[in-house]
Image (cartoon, rainbow, N blue to C red):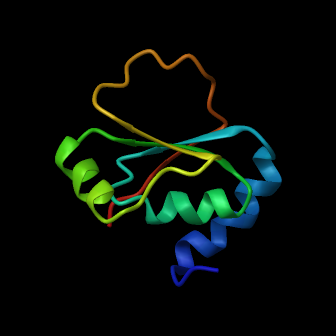
Amino acid sequence: MHDDPWLERWIARMVADCGSAPVLALGCGPGADTAVLARAGLEIVALELDAQAAERLLATGWRPVSREHYVTGKYANPKALWEIVLERDG
């Protein structure tokens, strides 16, 4: 599914623990991890505050899919409760 052992280890657990609850992915960069999680059946809201990073991603031709959202800019006071918040550095 994905060549990242860390992500592989957690995908099944996230699906089992959260079912259809949304997952907030902070600082998602190009969205590679969030795409994998969305394909695994999780509902993902991907947040990237760096507008330039978002522009670079969109320049590659990538577009959000039905179960994956990509948000840029400030994200204060979200109107949802999150079962999982995923942030990963590198």
**Quadrant into which the N terminus falls:** bottom right
- Point out residue 43 in the picture as x, y percentages from the top left corner: 66, 45
Above or below — where is 42 with respect to 70?
below
The one nearer the camera, 38 or 78, is 38
Residue 56: image x %, image y %? 23, 58
**Would you identify the image quadrant in which residue 58 lies?**
bottom left
Q: Quadrant of the C terminus?
A: bottom left
Relative horizontal placement of residue 16, taking residue 11 as reference (left or right): right
Q: Is residue 6 above or below residue 79?
A: below
Residue 84 occupies which quadrant of the picture? top right
Asked whether 12 or 34 is in front, the reply is 34
Q: Examine the image and state in which quarter residue 12 appears.
A: bottom right
In the image: residue 8, left or right of residue 87: right
In the displayed structure, 9 sits above or below 14; it is below
The residue positioned 79% from the left and 49% from the top of the image is 17
Report the residue that reaches farthest toward the bottom.
Answer: 3
For image coordinates 58% across by 66% down, the residue present is 36
Residue at 57% in and 51% down:
65
- Residue 40 placement (x, y as % from top left): 71, 63
**Residue at horizontal 76%, vertical 56%?**
15
